Image (cartoon, grey):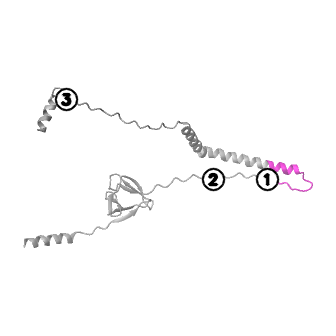
Amino acid sequence: MKANNILNRILAELASVREVKFEQMTLENGAVLEAEVFEAGNEVFVISGEDRIAAPVGEHLLSDGRILVIAEEGLIAEIKEAAAPEAEVEVEVEAPEVELAEVEVTEEAPVADVAEAIAKVIEEVAAMREEMKAMREEMGAYAKKEEMAAVKAELSAAPAAKPIKHNPETKQVNKVEFNRPAKAIDRVLARLNN
C-alpha cells in the first residue's frame, strides 16, 4: 500500500505541474532567442539545434529593431527601443532672387550689353555658391572630412609594426649529482618512496 500512496502522490504532483510555453525572438543576425517572457529579470537562452545556451553578456539587436541588454549571462537586464539614427541636418537656404537685366535682343541692342548681363548673373551665382560653401564649413560638413583625411595621413606616415620573431626558450639542463651529501628533502623523499 505504501508504494501505491507514493505513486499516487507523484502522479498528483506531475498533474499539477503547469506546461511552460516559451517565447522566441530572432536577432538581426538570425540567431533565435528563447525566454519564458521577454522582460527584465527573466532568463534568456540562445537556441542552437537541440541545445539551449545562456545568452552572452552585451547588447543584442533584435530583428524588430529593439535592443536586448544582458548584464549577467543568461539574464535580461532590459529591452530598450533602438536609438533613432541621427538624421542629417538639412538647412534650407533661400536663394536670393536674382534680377536678370531685361535686355531685348534686337538688331539695335548691342551684343555687348547681353554679354554684360550674362556675366553679371554668372558672378552672382558664383557668389551664392561661395556663401553656401561657407555655411557648410561652419556646420562642419567639410571639417569632418578634413579631420579624417588628417588622421589617415598621420596613420599612413607611421611606421609599420615590427614582425614578431619566434624565440624559443633555452633548454634547461638538469644536472644530477650522485656523490653529494643527502639533504633533508632527499631523506623525506626516500622515506615516502619506501
**Horizontal arrangement in the rendering, residue 128 relative to residue 153 (left or right):** right
Q: Are marks 1 and 3 in contact (CB under 8 Å)?
A: no
Q: Which residues are magenta?
A: 99-119
Q: Are marks 1 and 2 in contact (CB under 8 Å)?
A: no
First in sequence: mark 1 or mark 2? Answer: 2
| Dot 2 amino acid type | Glu
Residue under numbered circle 2: 92
- Image quarter of residue 22: bottom left
Measured in 3D between alpha carbons, the distance from the residue under mark 3 to the one under mark 2, in whole angstroms, is 95 Å
Measured in 3D between alpha carbons, the distance from the residue under mark 1 to the one under mark 3, in whole angstroms, is 113 Å
The residue shown at (62%, 44%) is: 137
Crowding around mark 3 (Cα neighbors within 10 Å: few <14, some 14 to 19, many 20+) is: few
| Dot 3 amino acid type | Phe
Crowding around mark 2 (Cα neighbors within 10 Å: few <14, some 14 to 19, many 20+) is: few
- Check the picture and name the quadrant holding the N terminus: bottom left
**Horizontal arrangement in the rendering, residue 71 relative to residue 81 (left or right):** left
Q: Is residue 191 magenta?
A: no
The percent coordinates of residue 33 (x first, y second) are 37, 61
Query: Residue 178 bears which disc, if any?
Result: 3
